Structure formats: structure tokens, C-alpha cells
Image: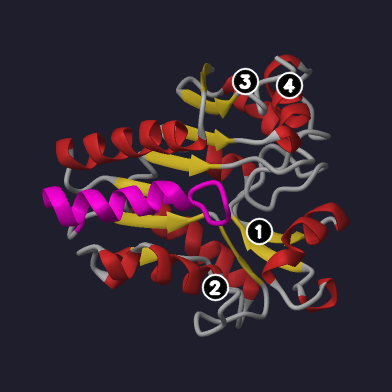
Amino acid sequence: MNITTYLTEEEIANAATAEIIEAVRRNPKTVLGLSTGNSPMRVYEMLIQDHKTNGTSYKDVITFNLDEYVGLDGASEQSYRYFMDKFLFKHIDIEPTNTHVPSGIGNLTENCESYEKLIKAVGGIDIQLIGIGTNGHIAFNEPGTPFDSKTHIAVLSIETIAANSKYFESEEAIPKQAVSMGIQSIMDAKRIIMVAFGKSKAKPIAGMVNGPITTALPASILQKHPNVSVLLDKEAASLL
């Protein structure tokens, strides 16, 4: 696990963005694993800026997002499909059919199985961008999720619901389940880049890096991945 500490969120985003751009230029058919929320926002802004300024093309890139809320379709402003379209996909030249977000409507079991098959069919994910929750979750894999889990229906913890309440009118409006890549799905990526900033991430980061590998802190399994970079600000790295 390669850990780098930066002074600002901007520097973190710049480092992650530069690696993604380099990968896409080197291999125009790169398969990217993407995430949502606060952590990757600046990365996506920088990717868009580079695309417009330098012409980096994504027309042959394939993407897979980590998760989606159960019960929300892509038209919902709180859905992760909506988020990705609004903050990245509509601003670059990627083919819409090459962008994949788990479906949280319909037959959820079939959706999970189909998502895993899609990832496998394209040869797996080359670079997976992730964050970390305050309880150590990655994607919506809450504490207790088996390390060998594949894409599945995840039950959200009270802590995760509270953390995501800012995106909804109330905590009651937040779906209590999500379709999420499993921990094994994430570990199968050839390369993982984690971005984390802020004091609230210091404890889970310390546990992930120095603690035992345990399902009580899902991100701790990353200790076993051969190619992980963790990009932190000083607050997130303060307990290391």
C-alpha cells in the first residue's frame, strides 16, 4: 500500500487525475471504476477540464460505478446515475452505452449477477477510484460484509445514512438499501486509488493501514491488494 500525504484537496485530486489521464492516453480502451460523493468531485472537474483543453478522448473508455440506491432510477436527482451524467459523462466524449451504473430497480438479484458478468466480459477494471466511509466502508460494503462478496444488495448502516442525509430532504427519504460492488469485486481491480480528506477520515484510515485485517473495518482488506495508492491530506493522515 503506497500512502502519500498532500497539503490540500486540490493536490490530492490533481495526483489522482493525472494518473487516470495517463492511463487513458496509454490505453484508449481503459476500464475505469468510478465512485460518487464528495471525494471524487474535484477529480471529475479536472478530467473535464483536461478533455476540453487537451483533447483527451474517452470514446473507447468503459466505466463501472461502485453502487446505486435501491428504488431510484436514473431520472432521480439523488441517484448515482444522475450524479455521474451531471458531473462527468455529459461533459466528455464517452459513449453513453460504455458507462455502467448498477440498477437499483427491477429484479435486484439479476441486476447484481448481470453487473458482475459485464465487468468480467470486458476483462475487469483497470483502475478503481474509491473513497472510504467514516466506519471504514468501501462502496456500500458496511462493517461485517464478507471479504469474498461480489455485487450484492447492501443494507446501509445508520452511520452511512446519517452521512448521506445532506443529499436528501431528510434521513427518512434515504433508501435503506443499495446495489453495491462487493469487496471482492473491488479487490479484483488491477489498480486501486483511494482519495480521502478531512479529520473524520483519520480513524478509519489509521485502522485500514495499521490495524488488523477484519470485516469490522472493510477497507482493511486493501492491505492485501498488490497495487493500491492512498492519497490523503494531513488531517486524514493525522493518526498514522
Location of the N terminus by quadrant is top right
Amino acid on which disc 3 is placed: Gln
- Residue 223 among magenta residues: no
Callout 3 crowding tier (Cα within 10 Å): few <14, some 14–19, many ≥20 = some
Q: Quadrant of residue 18?
A: top left
Please give the label number shown on residue 152: 1
- Between marks 4 and 2, how big is the CA–CA gap? 33 Å
Spatial CA distance of label 2 from label 1 is 11 Å
Q: Position of residue 10 (x, y in %)?
A: 44, 37
Q: Which mark is residue 27?
A: none
Secondary structure beneath label 4: helix
What are the residue bounds of the magenta stretch?
Answer: 33-58
Mark nearest the camera among 1 and 4 is 4
Which residue is disc 2 drawn over?
A: 103
96 on left or right of 151: left
Whichever of labels 4 and 3 marks the residue nearer the N terminus, that label is 4
Quadrant into which the C terminus falls:
top right
Q: Find residue 155 and report its image quarter.
A: bottom right
Residue under numbered circle 4: 206
Looking at the image, is mark 3 or mark 1 earlier in the sequence?
A: 1
Residue type at numbered disc 2: Ser
Q: Cβ–Cβ below 8 Å for labels 2 and 1?
A: no
Asked whether residue 50 appears in the rendered view, the answer is yes
Rendered residue at 17%/60% (across/down): 59
| Amino acid beneath label 4 | Ala
Q: Give residue 223's mark.
A: 3
Number of marks present in the image shown = 4
> Mark 4–mark 3 contact, CB under 8 Å?
no
- The answer to whether any part of residue 57 appears in the image is no
Above or below residue 38? Residue 161 is below
Q: Relative to 50, does residue 103 appear above or below in the rendering? A: below
Q: Which mark is nearer the camera, 2 or 1?
A: 2
